[in-house]
Image (cartoon, grey):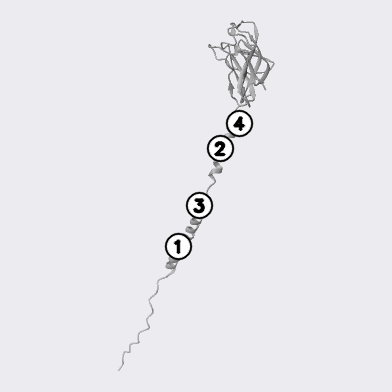
Amino acid sequence: MSQNITPPPLPGHPPAQPPRKNTNAIIIGAAAAVIAAIIGGSIIASSSDSSDAAPAPTVTVTTTAAAEVAAEQEDATPTPTQDTDFKVGEQARNGGAVVRISKVVESDTITLAGAQKAAGSDAKYVTLKTTVSNEGKSSMDLTCSLPIVNALIDDRGRRFDSIEDLYDVAGNPECNAQLQPGFKDEMLFVYRVPKDAKIALWEFEEYDLESEPNPTLVDLT
């Protein structure tokens, strides 16, 4: 009698494990990101500390800019001796007024109305000895009216008016002494200026209500 013998069961195989390659990559990538974040934070903190320790030299830049602007302004300022038309000793013309300056005199006192008048400890008088010729068509009152508009100019561009009552200056024409066309007369233009002023120019023009003539400049240096 035959028997059916059932063979014993074969030993079981453990179930196949899924591949772990992707999981490892994810873990490694996450770790790298964390490390990079830590290093980046340290660099930023270090940069911030360095920035706090060494601020930008804004004061130096501002000072340099101010110096450059001042230099440009100084270069842009014209010197008083530029574009002069005449020199001392030459006949300078403006309209019908022709003036020749023969001498420039600086003094502490002048003779005014027969008496000596002092300029003061911080001032001086500058006197222009001139000859004025009237080549216009009407008379000129050199000392009481304003036939010749004038100004004395120093090397800093400061403008000075002549003193009042020029008719009281010894040697000047009297008030209302009309200088007729075709004649000439001696005239002293006197100015009171600071003691340290360095005179550079004399500017004048014939007084004219109908037009605005360009002033004539005489170099006094």
Residue for point 56% across, 35% down: 69
Foreground: disc 1 or disc 2: 2
State the image quarter where residue 194 is shown: top right
| Residue 110, picture quadrant | top right
The residue under label 3 is which amino acid type? Asp
Residue 106: in sight, yes or no?
Answer: yes
Give the residue pinned by disc 2.
66
Q: Secondary structure at mark 2?
A: helix
Marks 4 and 3 sit apart, C-alpha to C-alpha, by 40 Å
Q: Name the residue located 42 percent from the left edge and 70 percent from the top edge.
A: 20
Quarter of the figure with the C terminus = top right
Numbered label attached to residue 75:
4
Q: Tell me whether the residue at label 4 lies in contact with that at label 1, contact meaning CB atoms closer than 8 angstroms.
A: no
Q: Circle 3 is placed at which residue position?
A: 52
**What element does badge 4 sit on?**
helix
Q: Return the x and y of residue 175 as percentages of the image width and height.
A: 58, 8
- Residue 23 drawn above or below residue 140: below
* Residue 34, numbered circle: 1
Nearest the eye: 75 or 90: 90
Badge 4 or badge 1: first in the primary sequence: 1
> Marks 3 and 2, Cα distance to the nearest angstrom?
26 Å
Give the number of marks. Answer: 4
- Using the rendered view, name the quadrant where residue 115 is placed: top right
